Image (cartoon, rainbow, N blue to C red):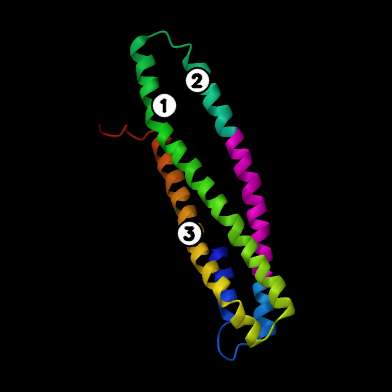
Amino acid sequence: MLIESTLTAMNALTQPGANLVDAYKNFTKQVDALGKVADKAKANSQKATAQREQYLKQWQESQAGIQNAQLKAASEARRAELMPKIEAIKASLTSAATTFKPFHQDLKDLTVFLANALNPAGVASANELMTKCNTDGTSVKADLAKASAAVKDLAASIQPGNPAPAK
């Protein structure tokens, strides 16, 4: 995972006897790659949000045409079953986006700071922010894992041929 490799590259700067120039180059490369992936993920998330809203609108419109009371109730029950799963995806992705932005900014700040203070004293003075980045990175990874699990749960729920869950 790119977050893990970025944190590993950052932490390599703190290793005794580390070649700071090589470690810094690797770290900045990882931070840049993380930013590119984040930009792509943000665009994909915006597209997915629009598609989700369109899908839910179309579903509601199509279901409004059901005249049979039993099928209408079953359709509403299915919607009620899936909505918490859809909302879980939305919530976890929103949380990941919220925690990612300051996390990535801190990493970028480190690259700028260390560009001008690439020595053991400079690295030591950035230790507090590096510790924060490790903590925040763990939070972002947890949010992304929740989102992934929520997507898998929704996919399993809507896959054709799966039996309806027991109530």
Binning the other alpha carbons within 10 Å of mark 1 as few (below 14), some (14 to 19) or many (20 upward) gives some
Q: In the image, which disc is placed on residue 146?
A: none
Helix, strand or loop at disc 2? helix
Tell me, yes or no, whether the two marked residues, 1 and 2, touch with CB atoms within 8 Å: yes
**Residue 44 in the image: x percent, y percent?**
62, 45
Examine the rendered structure and indicate whether residue 101 appears above or below residue 68. Answer: below
Residue range highlighted in magenta? 28-50
Q: Which of the two discs, 2 and 3, labels the residue nearer the N terminus?
A: 2
Helix, strand or loop at disc 1? helix
Side (left or right) of 14 relative to 167: right
Please name the predominant secondary structure of the magenta segment in the image: helix
Quarter-of-image position of residue 82: top left
Binning the other alpha carbons within 10 Å of mark 3 as few (below 14), some (14 to 19) or many (20 upward) gives some
**Would residue 153 be visible to someone looking at this image?**
yes
**Residue 153 in the image: x percent, y percent?**
40, 43
Identify which residue, 164 or 17, lies in the foreground. 17
Q: Which of the two discs, 1 and 3, labels the residue nearer the N terminus?
A: 1
Taking the spot 55% from the left edge, 85% from the top edge, the residue there is 15
Q: In the image, which disc is placed on residue 79?
A: 1
